[in-house]
Image: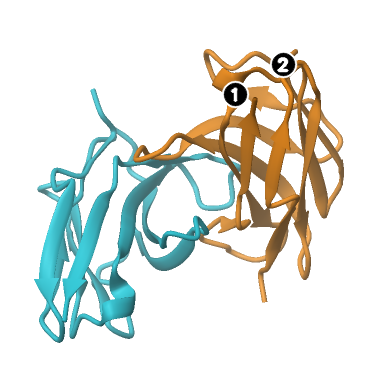
Amino acid sequence: AQKITQTQPGMFVQEKEAVTLDCTYDTSDQSYGLFWYKQPSSGEMIFLIYQGSYDEQNATEGRYSLNFQKARKSANLVISASQLGDSAMYFCAMREGQSNAGNMLTFGGGTRLMVKP
Amino acid sequence: GAVVSQHPSWVICKSGTSVKIECRSLDFQATTMFWYRQFPKQSLMLMATSNEGSKATYEQGVEKDKFLINHASLTLSTLTVTSAHPEDSSFYICSARPFFGVEKTQYFGPGTRLLVL
């Protein structure tokens, strides 16, 4: 079974509007971390936001927020006020286990976001 | 802070050549570095986890004799693709986890595009 599932291969959003990118995950660990990365066409992976499994508040970083629904095992990324520069691939990832362990990240298949002017 | 560099950014080589890719954490020490591979329009796939001073841990299906990893210091890991073939053409990305603090994420290098002719 997939550990990280991103069901939207591609999405369009109008500039200045908000958009939600879906991510569901599967783990039996109690302690885990969820991440979102942005990958523009240049290929670099840019860290956007992090949510720990024990964090009670949804994470926010500027225009990015993470809608964490633990019971549903979902960690959707919300981008507010989309900008043309937001056009990129977005990957959801999970780290299972304690944060200080050398655990690997498992990535979802990605969502390509295209912002329309 | 938390900058990771990779060198070279582009490699074109003939089949049978060995290619070395360097991954450096520029402003922090990393006990653990990760090597990923990404084919076009696909997600990142972890190849191996590299810990300083010890042998790398390879993911299932990754040939350790073909993809040699050396993590000689807390700021440098190298991936050598030995006797490269066209099917090894891909985008290789490294990431590094900082040594100190409750660090939540891996920091990624800009990637290396390998084309084997």
At mark 1, the secondary structure is helix
Chain A painted colour:
cyan
* Residue type at numbered disc 2: Lys
At mark 2, the secondary structure is loop
* Vertical side of A73 occupied by B28: above or below: below
- Residue A53: in sight, yes or no? no
Q: Which mark is residue B88?
A: 1
Query: Residue at position x 24%, y 36% from top?
Result: A26
Query: Residue at position x 45%, y 34% from top?
Result: B39
Within-10-Å neighbours for mark 2: few <14, some 14–19, many 20+: some
Q: Which residue is mark 2?
A: B66
Q: Are marks 1 and 2 in contact (CB under 8 Å)?
A: yes
**Discs 1 and 2 carry the same chain letter:** yes
Chain B painted colour:
orange
- The answer for which chain carries disc 2 is B
* Residue type at numbered disc 1: Asp
